[in-house]
Each structure stands twice: as structure tokens, then as C-alpha cells.
Amino acid sequence: MNLKPETFSRIDEVIPHYPVKRSAALPLLHLVQEDQGYISQEAIEWIAAKLELQPINIYELVTFYPMFRQKPIGRRHIKVCRTLSCALMGGYKACGEFEKQFNTHRGEISPDGEVTIEFVECLASCGTAPVVMIDDDLHEKVDCAKARELSARIKTEAATRQ
Amino acid sequence: MIAPPKPELVTVNIDGREIAVPKGTNIIEAARMVSVDVPHYCYHPKLTVVGNCRMCLVEMGLPAVDPATKAPIMDPATGKQKINWMPRPTIGCATNASPGLHIRTTSPMVKECREGVMEFLLINHPLDCPICDQAGECKLQEQATGYGRGYSRFIEQKNVKPKRTLLGPRVVLDDERCVLCSRCIRFCKEVAKDDVLGFIDRGSYSTLTAYPGKKLENNYSLNTVDICPVGALTSTDFRFKMRVWFLKQTNSIDTESSVGANTVVWSREGVIYRLTPRRNDAVNDTWMADSGRLLYKQVRTDDRLATVQVNGAESGRDIAVNAASERFKQGGVAIVGSGRSSVEEQFLAKKLAAALKAPAYLVSRVGKGDNLLISADRNPNVRGALVTGLIQTLPSAHLTELAASIDAGRIKTVVSLGEDLTAAGLSAAQLAKVSVIYLGTHANPTSAAAKIVFPGLTVFEKNGTFVNQQFRLQKFHKAVPGFTGAIDDLTVLAKLVAAASSSGTAVASEINALWTSLAAEIPALGTVLFKNLPETGLLLDSTPWAGLPYAESATLHYQLAQPALATA
């Protein structure tokens, strides 16, 4: 399993926190997804072996929780809220604007590999709807103009990186 | 032997009837003891309790006590202790008997619960009973009739899930029929120790599946088909072959090893369609190996022996017996018995050996035991040969002693009871030196070389008994008529014994008549008779044969009598 050295050390650190190894399954899945961007079949088997379980036990978990991905995503993950408040305040429009800006569709990786856009359920900021999370940062009151601005910022950062 | 400690009994009240049950018994089992059916899907007596089907909901009450003084509160109307009924139902499978526990299984609330659970289970269940293999032995079908509301209120679309998934080489899965009881998952994990099955996409689309890239291919996979309460898991071998209600069930014994798993043979009009395990808590619980389920295929094969032969020509039974009798008169006879023969056949073989003063041998078959239900000794009845006195020591795989006697010219005739002598180490040259009398079911090099051949019956075509590794005497019954042309081995053996004995008196060949003399002549069998032998078998006293170096290691319900004392 090809993980970053710090991921390995965090994995070894987290397992003894639990009375039985099996309980560390979810933290390990989070760590691996953070490192790799998704949970591959190899990762499932590696985690199972690490926790002395069978791969099916981990596979059951991965398919149950929607936040675990089994396919790679773009460099950034744009999560647009679609629960009631955001939906009423224009969450769908914001999502459409992001899709237009990156020439992609929800759930797919944009052609430049930069982003994956997805709808999510409530991000607990209904007062400032519609809200969007880009990776770990919350952006409030995202109308079409703000969506364009955020997209431009991502594109600039991408350009400077190259 | 130390007697097991007597279980502590507690009295529970089920639908008004009091019964004393061992402490820890759950409500389903306790109700079974008073003939009350508590419907269930996920609960299985030999698997852990998960309580996920909710079908066994019952009403429960406990005797009332004063919270402060702990004194019983009496009901003045009845003079008995008051019962505090819980406002909500509880699942029977996970509720253990406790003193004074009261259960109602017929109240309006229980009826409503069952109807509700049945309604939910049927929401996504395809109503394809007319083409479903499980029809006739389906719990969902039975309980929909018994406890369902009888009509559907569901007008929405049913879920679509994978049909015809091949979980492994012997098991097919229809996910739409699955009621998510998880018995198969628990079986694989707890009994077969091959944890490959699981539920993925839990929620409305919960799907039973094997881990991608893995298969349900352990040698116990077909038990999942047996315990599946619905038609989700079906056997590739039995699928679409026959309606179960047409099949006749006959109790039998698995012959693949000395475990002697109890089985049921399912047949119709002389044709066997499947073998399934039969519950015996002292031998095989409710399981059996997949390999043993295929043994019925040996009944109808092209190489079955179907004619009596004398010197290669088709002949009749009595002519062949006379021909054998002529050989016997010349002396120098050896008998190769078989660990696959029944106790009765071994008894007659012993009589034949005694009448001819012939040495008797047995051929051992040793494989690898799987520590579950296949033992290392692949003969089902070596211990029967010990009990009947056919042999005194355990057999070896090669007949070296017999080979030496043949080379020395001491043996002129060999009677083989279904054993292939070439496979047992005799060379073609040694076989050519003797005349072989062969009683067997299938053609092999020995039957081809034999001077006299009697076609015999397989275990499915005759009655008899085996003694398994625990020295448990277990009987099997005739499920289908004998193969055309084949003769009951007991008839042939009885005629040979009569021909060999100086007096020439007839010997009983009918099983019940034979058992009278069997029981009389073999002290270990005491007063046992075939007809009163219980279907779950009878444990014989094994002390006379305790010290022998048996091939078996521990399997389910079998521990070695003593730890292997430096056998190496």
C-alpha cells in the first residue's frame, strides 16, 4: 500500500486508541481517503489485513457511508448544499454555474482534473444559504457571481502551480 | 466418564402453559417445547442470535414485585402474583427464559406485529413462487400464509436487484428474493470460517454479495442454501430439477468419512435428486459437506455392475454361488472386507471368514481431515469391522500381508467386498495367480479380473448401519429400489456363508431377522435391534478398542479419546 509516511504513522497511532482493532476501521478509512482521495480495492484489503478482518467487513462499511468514495476525484472537491434552505436560495443555480465554469457534470472529474462537483446534504449554515464547501473551507451566500469568482480563484491557483 | 452438570431449570409461562426449561433457553426454543410456533427467519439454533428479522416478536411480562420491599405483589382476583406486561413487544430469539417469565404469542398485538413484519418483508419480494425452487419449503411462503394479512397494500414499484448471481461454483443468488436475515453470512463466518459474504449498499438496496474477486467455494457452501429461509440461495445442482413436494425423504448416512453425518435422501420414482443434512446435535448439528451431497450420482453411472458373471460370462445368482462354493472347497481363501460395507455385511463377512477359516483384511483410506465434518478416515465404517470382529487391528492402505501370502502360494481365492485390490497394492501378476470373487457396485480393474462377480447395491439402495468415529451406531434406509440386475449384498453374503459352512444351514439375509443373531452374537450390540435403533444413533461402549491409533483428528463433536501420546 502506497501511502505517505505521515499517514502510516497516524494509522499506527490511532489503532491502539480502541479496545478492539475492528473499531479502528472507520478512522483508517478516513485517513486512507484523505491520503489517496478515494478508497481503492487494494486499500480495502490492506485495511482488512491491518485490522485482522476479512475484506468483506471493510467493503460493507465503504458501501454504506456515502462519504467514502471508491473512485478518484478531482484535485478539489466542491460540495454544494442542496438541502431545503440552500435549495430555496439558489443552491442549484450555484451548482450549475460551477459545472459551466469547469465544463463538467456533477459527480465527474472536470476535464482539467481540477475539480469534482457534488451535491451534499445540509452543511449547517442555513442562515447564509446557499453555502458551498471547497475541500475544508466553507463559502457562504454563493450566488452565481460568487461561484464565478471562486472558480476563477481555483483556476488561477491551478495556473500558478504549473 | 463425568456426567454433564444438570442444567438449572426455570419455569416460564407460554400462552398460559407452564414449562420448566434450562436457564438461558430462548423463547423460540422454549415455545417449541410446548408445541407453540414462534415464526422466525434470522434465528437459527446453531448460529449466533442477531435479531434482525423481527418476525419472532412476542408479548412479555414479568412477575410484579414491590419496588421498595421486593415483596411479590399479589393479584387479589386470582390469588397469584401479578404480571407486569411490557407495553411493547420483544423479540423471542434474544429473550432468554428467566423465572416466572410470561409470554403471549397469540395476543392481538403479536398478531399485528407479525402482519406488519410480513408486509414489510413482502414489499420488495418478487412473488415468483411458481418459478421459485424454494416453493414448498419456503419460510416466507409458509409464514405469509400463516401470519400475513393476506392482501397487499403496496402500489409502488418494487426494487430491482441482481438476479442469478453466481456466488460460487455451487450456489446461485437471487438478491430480490433475499430477506436479509444474514444466516448465510453468519454460517460462513462462524461455522465454515470463510468470511466472504456480506451486505453492501445497506439501506433500501441492501444486497448480499461475495467480496469482489472472492467466491463462496468452501466445501460447506451448500449449507447456506439449506438455511436460507427463502429462495435467495439455490443450489446449482438441484435448481429447476424437481418440486420438493414430489420428493420422498429417506434418512441416510453420509459415507464420505467416518464422521457419519446424518442425511436425508430426496427421491422420486426411484431417482435421487438431492442429499441434505439431517439434524443430529451429537454428530453434525445441521450441516454437511458439499462433497458428500454429490455421492448420490454414483447410483446411476455407466460403470455400475448389472449382471452376475462367472468366468466373464453372464450368469445367474445361484450358479455363481455354486461356482464360489466349488472354489471354497479347494481351500486357501482370503477375505478382503471393506470399511464401506455396513455392519451387517461385515458381520456376514466375519461369518464367512470363520466358516472358511480364512484371514480377513480391510483396506484403509486416509485423507486429510478438515476439522469440521470430514475426518481423516475416509471409510465410513472401519469401527463396524472392529465391533463385529471382522478385524482386530486397524487396517493399512496396502494389503502387503495378503500379497506375500499370494506370492507364497498359500492363497488361491480372494473374496473382495467391493475393494479394488489393485488400488490396494496387489499387482496384476498377483491378481492373475488367484481367482477373485467380487461383490461390488461399480466396475474396476478387480471386477474385470474377477472370476465371479456379484453386482451389489449402493448405500442408497439398501438398509443397514454404520459405526462412526464416536462408535455411534447409525442406521440408513433404502431410499430407491436397487439398480436393475444388482442383488442385495446381504443375500449374496448369506448364500456364500451357507455354501461355505459344513452344515449348509441357511443364514438370515433380511435385515431385521439378521439383527436378532447379530445382537445375540456381538456383546457390544447388546439388545439393539435394527427396528428400534433411534434415528439419531446409539453410542456403543468403545472401551475394548480405546487404545488403537485411529487416523482421525478432532472434528465437530469429536475429540480424541486421549491426547495423542507421542504417536510420532
Image: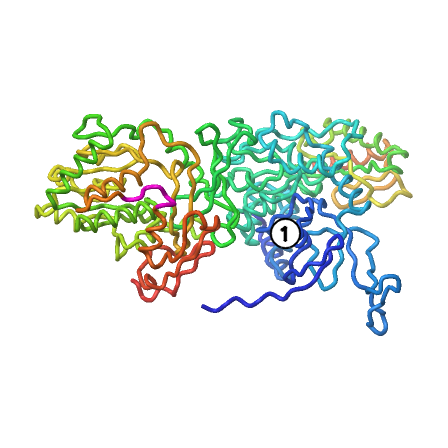
- What colour-coding does the image apply? rainbow
Work out whether residue B447 or residue B356 is closer to the camera in this orientation and state it: B356
Q: Quadrant of residue A141?
A: top right
Q: Is residue B307 rendered magenta in the image?
A: no
Residue A2 in view here: no
- Residue drawn at the location 17% of the way across and 33% of the way down: B451
Q: Position of residue B442 (x, y in %)?
A: 30, 33
Q: Is residue A82 visible?
A: yes
Q: Quadrant of residue B13?
A: bottom right
Tag 1: amino acid: Ala
Check residue B509 for magenta coloring: yes
State the quadrant of the N terminus of chain B: bottom left
Q: Is residue B140 left or right of residue B269?
A: right
Q: Residues within 10 Å of mark 1 (few under 14, many from 20)?
A: many
B67 left or right of B21?
A: right
Q: Which residues are magenta?
A: B507-513
Q: Quadrant of the C terminus of chain B?
A: bottom left
Q: Nearer the viewer, residue B388 or A76?
A: B388
Foreground pick, A63 / B268: B268
Query: Is residue B92 shown left or right of residue B236?
Result: right
**x%, y% of residue B371?**
43, 53
SS class, disc 1: helix
User: Residue at horizontal 47%, vertical 37%?
Assistant: B265
